[in-house]
Image: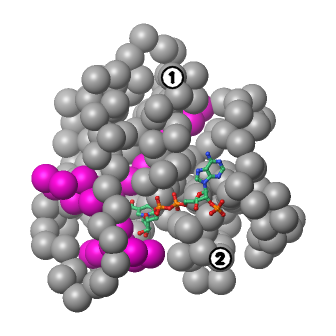
Amino acid sequence: MTIVAIWCRHEGDDIIGIGPNIPWQIKSDTKRFRNLTLGKTLVVGQKTYESFPGRTLPNRKFVVLTFDKEYQVSDTENHCIATDIRQLKDYPEDLYVSGGATIYELFFSMPDMRPDIVVDCLYHGDINPKLEGKPISVHKSVEIMRENYMQLPNEYELDNITTTVWLKKGDFVEQSLIKKILDYLETEGK
Ligand SMILES: NC(=O)c1ccc[n+]([C@@H]2O[C@H](COP(=O)([O-])OP(=O)(O)OC[C@H]3O[C@@H](n4cnc5c(N)ncnc54)[C@H](OP(=O)(O)O)[C@@H]3O)[C@@H](O)[C@H]2O)c1
């Protein structure tokens, strides 16, 4: 099982959200996330799950992290809950950790659950000043990433976002999956 983390963070402060919202709207960012996760199993916190329209995304499966054992998912066939990250240790499919900040930090802070691959999208533009709510940042996860991961030299620029890929140091990482991700990033927007 390979664990991939994917996020888009704001340059400088590592903000990924304000209240329940992502504070930028960039079509190619949404498209990148969609194309890299289609057909995959996404792990999300309950708050991020609730932020998706209808609490779902087409052609994706979900594991929703929540402490609430009674939490009802919107699609009982393709979505399930986990109340402890340890339940995902030997998960039978690759997992795409997709937010929010609490869930990224949960994975990064446990050495044996750290993502193997990080798709790190860095947004250089302005944050929507009209949004109200608490800024949510992945700063702690980024610090752990910088210390424990190796950044591949390839940089992909599109619509004010630079994407790079980081690999966990010292562990074997599934090469075919890295290649698939890099191939997609190489061709996107062209
Ligand atoms: N820019 C991006 O790439 C990106 C991606 C995804 C999300 N976001 C943004 O991130 C923000 C949401 O992040 P967030 O950190 O506030 O919330 P979150 O991570 O989406 O969800 C937090 C919830 O996860 C559950 N949880 C936390 N720790 C857990 C544990 N150890 N075991 C089981 N369940 C656990 C709890 O649910 P219960 O309360 O139900 O127990 C908690 O309330 C939003 O602004 C969203 O738009 C941005």
Which amino acid lies under the numbered mark 2 shown in the image of this protein?
Arg
Nearest the viewer among 187 and 82 is 82
Q: Is residue 67 visible?
A: yes
- What residue do we see at 43% from left, 49% from top? 6
- What residue do we see at 77% from left, 75% from top? 74
Please rate how many residues cluster around mark 1, counting C-alpha atoms within 10 Å: few if below 14, some from 14 to 19, many from 20.
few
Nearest the viewer among 11 and 159 is 11
Which amino acid lies under the numbered mark 1 shown in the image of this protein?
Pro
Q: Is residue 162 left or right of residue 19?
A: left
- What residue do we see at 29% from left, 75% from top? 23
* Mark 2 lies on residue: 55
Which span is picked out in magenta? Answer: 2-24
Q: Is residue 129 left or right of residue 98?
A: left
Q: Is residue 24 left or right of residue 41?
A: left
Mark 1 → mark 2, Cα distance in angstroms: 30 Å
Could you tell me which secondary element the residue under label 2 belongs to?
helix
* Mark 1 lies on residue: 111
| Quadrant in the rendering for residue 45 | bottom right
Nearest the viewer among 136 and 187 is 136
The x, y position of residue 151, in whole percent, is: 26, 29
- What residue do we see at 48% from left, 51% from top? 102
Please rate how many residues cluster around mark 2, counting C-alpha atoms within 10 Å: few if below 14, some from 14 to 19, many from 20.
some
Residue 21 magenta: yes
The x, y position of residue 75, in whole percent, is: 80, 72
The x, y position of residue 174, in whole percent, is: 54, 25
Q: Is residue 105 left or right of residue 75?
A: left
Task: First in sequence, mark 1 or 2: give its number.
Answer: 2
Mark toward the viewer: 1 or 2: 1
Q: What label does residue 82 carry, if any?
A: none
Q: Is residue 182 visible?
A: no
Q: Is mark 2 within 8 Å of ligand 1?
A: no
Could you tell me which secondary element the residue under label 1 belongs to?
helix
